[in-house]
Amino acid sequence: MAGKILICYGSRYGTTTEVVQEMKKTAEELGISTETAFLKKEKPSSSLHEYDLIVIGSGIAAGRWTNEPLDFIKNNIEILTTQKTALFVVCGDAGNPDRCDEAQKMYLDSISEQYPELNPISTTLIGGVFDFKKYNFAVRALVKRIVKSNLSPGEELPEKIDYRDWDKVRNWIQELTQQIQP
């Protein structure tokens, strides 16, 4: 196999895990050895120097990354500056074209500003999922209020809204793999 990728990430409700699984499947179909690490439960199995690309991502809830990927960046910044890296977030704002520029600034550009030495080769926003059954009462009420504000008057709020664009996910990981193949 040509190339080795690590995709490490944080997820609260499982949406980001599903996106990462599709990234891994796509990369492996292209002959790229791909490891995933759900940072809340596991660490990469190899030294970070052994990867040709390190992809770091998080789901966004209440306007924030999960803690584990941010800690991963902070704790490994010296190694990450010597490796090709890419960043992604999975968020509801990516499903709203009017909010994408702001989401890019808040969730991706802000990480690059906080860690300018990181210098990712690519960043992307991936649409998220609002699955109201998975949230506790307080979160469900807050998220429903936010989502309703973006609906047309009289439009019903479904129990689940899925903004993921699977072609975008596959295309992004394919583009990344092209940058690491000899």
Image (cartoon, grey):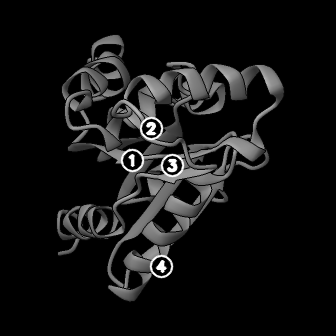
Query: Residue drawn at (24%, 32%), measured in percent from left and top?
Result: 100
Q: Up-down: is 142 above or below 131?
A: above
Q: CA distance from mark 2 to mark 3?
A: 27 Å
Secondary structure under the numbered disc 2 in the rendered image: strand
Which label is found at residue 127?
A: 1
- Which of the marked residues, 4 or 3, is nearer the chain's N terminus? 4
Q: CA distance from mark 2 to mark 1?
A: 5 Å
Expressed as whole percent of the image width and height from the top left, the position of residue 129 reads: 53, 48
* Neighbourhood count class around disc 3 (C-alpha, 10 Å): few under 14, some 14–19, many 20 upward: some
Expressed as whole percent of the image width and height from the top left, the position of residue 113 reads: 28, 13
Which residue is disc 3 drawn over? 48
Which residue is disc 2 drawn over? 91
Secondary structure under the numbered disc 4 in the rendered image: helix
Q: Up-down: is 28 above or below 114?
A: below
Residue 173 seen in the current view: yes
**Callout 4 amino acid:** Lys
